[in-house]
Amino acid sequence: MKYPRTFSPLQIGSLHLRNRIAMAPMTRRKAAEDGIPTHEITAYYRRRAANEVGLIISEGTAIDNTHAFDTKTVPRFVTNDQIAGWRHVVEAVHKEGGAFAPQLWHCGRLAENPIGPMEDTPPAKADGTPRPTVRPMEAADFDQVLAAYKHSAKKAKEIGCDALEIHGAHGYLLDSFLSETTNQRNDLYGGSVENRMRFPLQVVDVVREAVGPDFPIIYRFSQWKVDDYREIKFKTPSDLETWVRALVKHGVDILHVSTRNVLDPGFADHGEKPLAVWAQELSGLPTIGVGSIAVTLPMDQTRSGVEGAISDPSPALALLEDGSLEMLAVGRSLIANPDWVPQVREGHWKDLAPYSHELLEELV
Ligand SMILES: Cc1cc2nc3c(=O)[nH]c(=O)nc-3n(C[C@H](O)[C@H](O)[C@H](O)COP(=O)(O)O)c2cc1C
């Protein structure tokens, strides 16, 4: 076999995976308006599990806060009915031999009714719609949001999820605390790096408290954010080291480093090493890399109507084969190709379908 390590089983703590390929979290906005995952959503995840995806990471699913989601059709992870919907998804994925991790999401300053570190007005959406001004979080907001993370984390464990992912990327709530451009608070939650890390790490702490010592926590972070693809949050390897070591100290089990192209050099003047590889080296934690695997369309042109081509996944898979990374997540190519794993494992990547934005219209 061309990729023996990629397609062999992996054990990370209590998490057993049949291979090293994860489905990247991808918002689909197709839940019922009360945030309940539908049968179509269950079938969509089951289809990927039936086609041998090792770990299914759900689309961002909102915690219990009116500011946590940006559309009513974003699924939520709060009420008994919503949790029952997710239980169906977990059972379906397990039945097909896959593992499942919900991605817990708070939209923060990019919500319809936004809260965040400070008062600011994020740039208009890609379609020109202006975004509302962000209300700075107060003490009661911090308490409520932490309690909401704790609740959802507890439920994730209760319904048999294999892990959970904290969405700390892309300019949403937790990322906006980490970033010095969107966090200029002058209290304990802003200013120094230690202060900017404080709230995301408090979230890790309450999640750990909720799930106990053995349940795997994945933390997803990024350099870029939805409203600024060029932001550089970690300017040097040392900045990254401070952050990932803090995540280690607070008990995160797996890092998920969201980059637009997994192969891009992590830093402008430190050689070719990708950011996720830096993160794995500096943290010693198993790390998931992601971005432009088997697709050529750059992330910021995803909505442009341009149809991308497919590309050879081998250079990315080489990072798994040589141990530079423990896992890779595949996003758009797995929307276009539910059977991505067998196609690539059997050497048929040239038969993969290209991704186009229209594919988001339906859950297939
Ligand atoms: C339609 C769509 C929805 C996405 N939603 C999320 C999300 O809910 N949470 C998240 O962390 N990333 C989200 N992303 C980013 C993906 O997880 C992934 O990092 C990105 O698509 C790059 O991987 P790819 O090139 O394999 O698609 C989304 C991407 C797409 C295309």
Image (tube, helix red, strand yellow):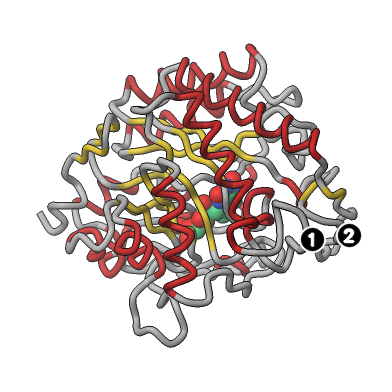
Disc 1 under 8 Å from ligand 1? The reply is no
Quadrant of residue 23 in the image?
A: top left
Amino acid type, label 1 = Lys
The residue lying at 85 percent from left, 61 percent from top is 120
Which is nearer the eye, 200 or 61?
200
- Whether label 2 touches label 1, CB < 8 Å: yes
Location of mark 1 (residue): 125
Secondary-structure class at tag 1: loop
Quadrant of residue 11 in the image?
A: top left
Count of numbered circles on the image = 2
Q: Is residue 40 above or below residue 221?
A: above
Image coordinates for residue 288, horizontal then vertical, percent: 37, 53
Which is nearer the eye, 121 or 261?
121
Image coordinates for residue 292, horizontal then vertical, percent: 44, 64
Tell me, for residue 12, which label it has, or none: none
The residue lying at 10 percent from left, 54 percent from top is 1
Task: Answer yes or no: is residue 240 visible.
Answer: yes
Disc 1 crowd rating (10 Å Cα; few below 14, some 14-19, many 20+) is: few
Q: Is residue 136 above or below residue 35?
A: below
154 left or right of 123 in image: left
Location of mark 2 (residue): 130
The residue lying at 39 percent from left, 51 percent from top is 329
Secondary-structure class at tag 2: loop
Amino acid type, label 2 = Pro
Q: Is residue 256 above or below residue 304?
A: above
Image coordinates for residue 77, horizontal then vertical, percent: 62, 25
